[in-house]
Amino acid sequence: MNTSGLEYQQPQSPIWSAHNFLLLTCLAITLLVFPFYAHVYKLNRYRDEHIAVFQVIDHFYMISKSSQISLIIMIVCVLGLVLFGDSNPILMVGIIAICWFHLQTTTEVNHFLLSLLAIQRFMLYFFPSTHRILNFNLKQIRIIIRSSYGLSLIYTAISISAWIYDKVSNSTDVENFKLIYTIPYFISNILLFITAFLYIPVFMSIRKLIGISSNHDNQPQKYIFWQFVMAISLKILLLPFAYLKAVESSPYFTKFSHVEDSFWIVLALNGKILDAMSTPLIIQLSYLSCNKRNVKTFISVFKTKNALKEVFCSCLKPPSRIENVPHSSSGSNANTS
C-alpha cells in the first residue's frame, strides 16, 4: 500500500462526516430526480418557447443536463482512483479537475443569470421607462449568456495566473490569489441575496394581479422565485458546515500547499463545492414544484404501468409535443418552465 502523503490526511471528525453526507445526499437526489425533471421539461418545452425568458429557462435545463454528465464522470473517476489508484492516477485526477471546472463555471453562470434576471424584472416592473433598455430580445439574451461564460473563464484564468505568480514570487504568501479567488465569490453571494430580496416584491405584486386569472399557475416568475428560495435556503443551511470545515481543514491545507493563512481560501472552496453540488438539484426541484401543472405531470408519471421506462427513455429522446396535461395560454404569461 502506498503510504505517501499520509501525513496530510485529515481526521474524519463529525464535521467532515456531516459535510460528506450532505454532498453525497445532494448527489444522489440530483441523479435520481433528473430523469423526472427532464421528462416534465420536455413535455412543456413547445408550449413554453414563446415565453420572454425561455432562453434563460432552457439554459438552466442545459446546465442541469451537462452537470449530470460531469457528476457521473467524476463518480466513475473516483471509483477508478479507489480501485486502480496506482495505475494511472494523473489521468483520473485530470478528468476530475476538468469536470469540476465545468461544474464551477456553470454554477457561477447560473447565479449570475438569476441575479441579472431579478434586477431586470425589478426594474421593468417598478420603472417601466427602462423597458427600451432592459427588455432583451433573443439575440441579446444569447450574448448575455455567452458573455457570462466568458467572464467566468476570465475569472478562473486570472485566479490561476495569480496563484502561479504568488508561488513563484513567494512560496508561502499568496495574497494576490487569495484576494482574486475569494472576494469575487463572496461578492457574488452577497449579490445573490440582495437580488433575491429585490425579486420578492415583484413576485408578490404579480401574484396579486393574476390571482383571479385562470393562468395563475403558469407564470415563469414562479420558477425563478423558487430557484431563489431554494438557493438562499440551502446557502443558509450549508454555511455553518462550510465554515466549520474551513476552520478544521485550513491547517491541513496550509501544510499541504505551503500557504500561510489559508482559512478564507478554504472557506471559498468549500462554498463553491457545496454550490456546485446543489445547483443542479435546485434547478430540478424548483422546476418540478413551481406550478400545479408540473406537479401534476410529475405525479401522473407514477400512475402509469411503465412509469420508469417512460421517464428514463424520454431523457434520451429529443423534446416532443405531448398534450396530455391541460393548460391555458395567454401571451407571454403562458406556462412557467
Image: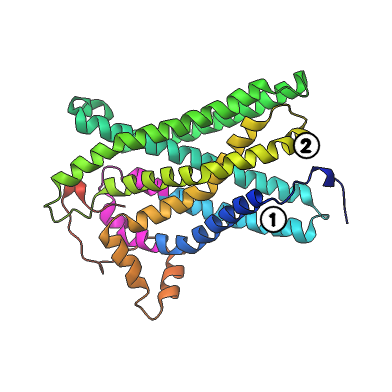
Extreme residue in the front direction: 14
Q: In the picture shown, does residue 216 fall above or below 167? A: below
Residue at the spot 61% in from the left edge and 29% down from the top edge: 157
Q: Which mark is residue 298?
A: none
Does the magenta portion include 40?
Answer: yes
Residue 290 seen by the camera = yes
Give the side of residue 132 with respect to residue 138, left or right.
left
Q: In the picture shown, does residue 194 fall above or below 36? A: above
CA gap, disc 1 to disc 2? Answer: 21 Å
Quadrant occupied by the N terminus = bottom right
Q: Secondary structure at mark 2?
A: helix
User: Tag 2 or tag 1, which sits nearer the N-term?
Assistant: 1
Q: Quadrant of residue 125?
A: top left
- Viewer-side residue, 266 vs 278: 266
The amino acid pointed to by label 2 is: Phe
Image coordinates of residue 202 in percent, x first then y, are 24, 38
Q: Which residues are magenta?
A: 39-60
Which of the colour schemes (rainbow, by chain, secondary structure, one colour) is used? rainbow
Residue at the spot 51% in from the left edge and 30% down from the top edge: 186
Residue at the spot 34% in from the left edge and 69% down from the top edge: 299
The amino acid pointed to by label 1 is: Val
Q: Quadrant of residue 257?
A: top right
> Which residue lies under the disc numbered 2?
256
Image coordinates of residue 300 in percent, x first then y, are 32, 72
- Viewer-side residue, 102 vs 182: 182
Does the magenta portion include 268?
Answer: no
- Viewer-side residue, 133 vs 173: 173
> Which residue lies under the disc numbered 1?
78
Q: Main secondary structure of the magenta part?
A: helix
Residue 275 seen by the camera = no
Nearer the observer, disc 1 or disc 2?
A: 2
Circle count: 2
